[in-house]
Amino acid sequence: MSAPLVDIRNVSHRFGQLPVLKDVSLAIEPGSYTILLGPSGSGKTTLLSILGGFVTPSEGKVFIRGQDCTAVPPAKRPTTTVFQDYALFPHMSVGGNVGFGLRMRGIDGATRAAKARDALALVGLAAAFDKKPHQLSGGQRQRVALARALVIEPAVLLLDEPLGALDLKLRRQMQDELKAIQKRIGTAFVHVTHDQEEAMALADHCVVMNDGGIEDEGPPERVYARPKTRFSATFMGESTILAGSVSGAENGIVTVSTAVGPVSLPGAPPAGDTVALAIRPEHLLLGEARGSVALGAGKVGDVVFQGSFKRVLAASALDAALQFIAKAPASATVQAGDTIAISCNARDIILLAD
Amino acid sequence: MRAAVRLAAWVYAIAVYGFIFLPVVVLVLFSLQATSFPIPPFTGPSLRWYQAVLADARLTSALVNSLLVAVLSSLASVTLGFLSAWGFARFVLPGSALLRGLITLPLTVSYLIIGMGLLVLFNWAGVPKSLLAAGIGHVVINLPLCFAIIYSQMGDHQINIERAARDLGAAEWKVLLLITVPVMAPAIFAGFFLSMTFSWDEFVISFLLTRFETTLPVEIWNLLRSGLNPKTNAVGSLVFAVSIVLVVFFELTLLRRKPA
């Protein structure tokens, strides 16, 4: 197996007394699109800053292309960063901005201009070469920042919530473009976000972070379908969480007693007696006895029409604290106040250690 | 009643502006006097006293000296002020607030005290009275000013811009020269022009610290000792005109905000 492009080994970091990263290890493969997903305060931005060289970790090492880069300053490491606020140089033209990194490497003006034009063409802004940053829209500035970071051909491109300042429509559009650009040039991207949709749309490798640690990592399909922890089951997409305890396990079938009765599902019991069962909204079935596992009746609290589907929130009749989150077809006739039977199929239940 | 209030407001406004500007108006008006005394009745307009000023070698050389001291001391003030503002804004320093207070303290000390202090110090150190000594005095009074102006404009939003430059491979001095200075240019120019204005018509420190070669305000003072004549008005008007130009530059650079 080839060595990873970036190898983060046992990195911990404290700001003063406050630990923000706790023994994090992460490998990033060449040509991959890695997303660091987590709520604010999860340490994802600190981890990115450590990769970019803006922060030197309190403990641990960072290897890039096999070289120890832990304490190498940003100017000297093969990474570039796209900042959340773009950080374009306001007094330089767009061409001057994009050519800046090449200028610092002593590349002559003509080559610089040609390369800057190529990079701008890559992000679809070929015509903006002579403009000033303040003449561009937010989305265009974002592209300039991207071109500026890519033109010096970094080994890893770091993006700090790059789409955070854009409106939703532009965001989805830029998201598609980011992915397309990444596939075309093949540079490894590491992208920080708290938007799980963005994460699922972009990532080859999704890293879910919480409270200074990595909760789960892997292909987004796997992280979504089979989250490893309760946190990633609720942060990467929504889930209904059933608390319970293991009451039996044999022949690959685990039985868990819960507030809505015993639930049997295939799998091996995790360590510890208390467990959590997570069920994705699209796996909850509404109406009489449709799935193999009955979850009791629910009183519908809210139905939100979302275009292609309806999001249904229902409180369990057996346990008021249990809130079902289900996805019903747009044509469903369910209404707030209805009492409805809820079920699911055993194979769709995710068994998690609590 | 309302009419009376309005009238009172007008009278008040005219009185205030008259109080402020009448001396200058009189000065400029009688610099254009055709006869030998700057007293009514007005006999001009005539430029003969301006001619006399420009023909006076002492005055013209003092004018050149003043310009030289103003430009060089302002350059030194703005450079030192910028570097200290950058240091305070970008690095965590022990006792930062105290040190910032100390650096701006000379703003509150009278020029007379600063001038006397420098006189004693230079005397002790064996630095002769000279334009250089006066220039150093002007740096002492203008550095805090440049520091305060530039520091107030050095916001956090520039931190990421500097980071981006470093990230793209710029050495620290290149970050300063190619990024921070141009981005801060309005504040830097504002500091420079304000320093120029203050140095240009500064009297006390120049008076205490120069001897043979001296600056224009000191030379005017020499001239005044032999009594008022329209020549003093003419040279005073010239000083005033240059100050106005500098203040306009200052206002333009500080107040002109870039779009977005």
Image (cartoon, rainbow, N blue to C red):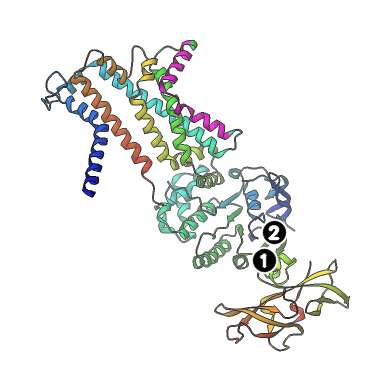
Indicate left or right for B243 with A5 as reference. left
Residue at the image position 72 percent from the left and 68 percent from the top = A227
Residue bearing mark 2: A210
> Label 1 is placed on what type of residue?
Phe
Q: Nearer the viewer, residue A192 or A96?
A: A192
**Element type where label 1 sits in the image:** helix
**Visible in this render: residue B27?**
yes
* Residue A49 image point, x, y percent: 62, 50
* Magenta segment: B96-123
Q: Nearer the viewer, residue A126 or B150?
A: B150
* Residue A180 image point, x, y percent: 55, 65
Q: Residues within 10 Å of mark 2 (few under 14, many from 20)?
A: many
Q: Which mark is residue A235?
A: 1
> Label 2 is placed on what type of residue?
Asn
Looking at the rendered image, the quarter that the C terminus of chain A falls into is bottom right
The subunit carrying tag 1 is A
Looking at the rendered image, the quarter that the N terminus of chain A falls into is bottom right
Q: Residues within 10 Å of mark 1 (few under 14, many from 20)?
A: many
* Residue B242 image point, x, y percent: 28, 30
Give the vertical position of A250 relative to B259 (above or below): below
Residue at the image position 72 percent from the left and 50 percent from the top = A11
Contact flag, marks 2 and 1 (Cβ < 8 Å): yes
Q: Nearer the viewer, residue B48 or A176?
A: B48
Indicate left or right for A123 with A36 as reference. left
Q: Are marks 2 and 1 on the same chain?
A: yes
Is residue B122 on the magenta stretch?
yes
Q: Nearer the viewer, residue B23 or A55?
A: B23
**Element type where label 2 sits in the image:** strand
Give the vertical position of A201 relative to A288 (above or below): above
The mark nearer the N terminus, 2 or 1, is 2
